[in-house]
Image (cartoon, rainbow, N blue to C red):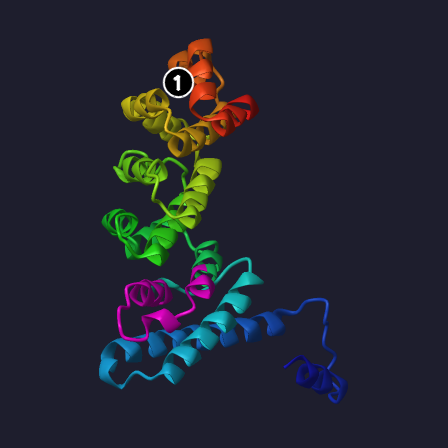
Amino acid sequence: DLNNIHMYIATTDTKINISKPVSFKYWKMTELKELLLKFNDQVTNLQNDETEVVEDTIDKINSTINECSLQVSILTSVPFPTHDTLLSIKQLLLYSGDLVQEIDYDALLEFLNNLIQLTTFDDILETFTVEDLQMALKSPIISLVQSACLIVSLSYPKGILASTIIFDILLDLYFKDDTEIIVVNAIDKIWYNLSSDKLVMDNILKNNLKLLQLIKQNLNPLPTVRLLNLLAILLEHIDSVNEFNSSIFLVSEEDAWKIIEKDILLFLHVIKY
């Protein structure tokens, strides 16, 4: 620990330039590597010894997740491959054993977030393929949907997934009344992060124009509020007349009266928009 390092420096005759903490950085990386290997081993054992899993096993994994997440969060780069750890996270997200409820998915998602910030998106897609992301978004398991949204939100380049059906699935989820609010918030983060990309904007406004028009015409409160939120985000990035579709972005006087008659709270959202 730091105390031992300081004691070592104080009790040696060797002059150490502490303004260049190369050794300390190496020590931290070694510690992180050992922690990640420990996490990988724990997940592997969980998969292999299903019948012997006890609550203490999950507790140890949760503890290691928190340690790993903390270590990764203070770094700006990782000088060794993270593929095995990403694979372990994926396996844990897919875990369906008796003690699945004991896994700290909030901590696991935070760990995933911290780790993929330091990983190239190409490397991420080697573990979480486009097909994996599509399946995760369609899953009834909320943690899987959240993890897929998290990965999509960090796409680089931003439009790398714009040619896939992922955005179709996201829009479908976004406008469903029964979609969990935590998922809606995760999708909102995708809109905020990626809608400045022309490919993403075209996918939403052109490829999915009929869906947007249908949501606008139906005037169902919850989907309409979410549509207004999405349009407000997109408006921040529209830089030409050709991209501005008045049939989507403008609310007519006739529609305004319909909204007032149907739901006054929805009308307040229109005013805000």
**Magenta segment includes 121:** no
**Disc 1: which residue:** 248
Q: Using the image, determine if residue 191 lies above or below residue 95.
A: above
Nearest the viewer among 266 and 60 is: 266
Q: Does residue 172 appear left or right of residue 198 in this picture? A: left
Check if residue 96 falls in the magenta segment. Answer: yes
SS at mark 1 in the image: helix
Residue 269 in the image: state x and y as whole percent: 52, 27
Instruction: Say if 165 sits above or below 73 in the image.
Output: above
Q: Residues within 10 Å of mark 1 (few under 14, many from 20)?
A: some
Residue at the spot 48% in from the left edge and 27% down from the top edge: 266
Classify 52 as above or below 87: below
Does residue 251 appear in the picture of this structure?
no
**Dominant secondary structure of the magenta stretch?**
helix
Look at 72% across and 82% down and name the residue there. 6
Q: Residue at x 38, y 73 (%)?
A: 102
Task: Give the x, y percent position of residue 78.
Answer: 48, 62
Q: Which residue is found at the position 37% from the left and 31% from the top?
A: 200
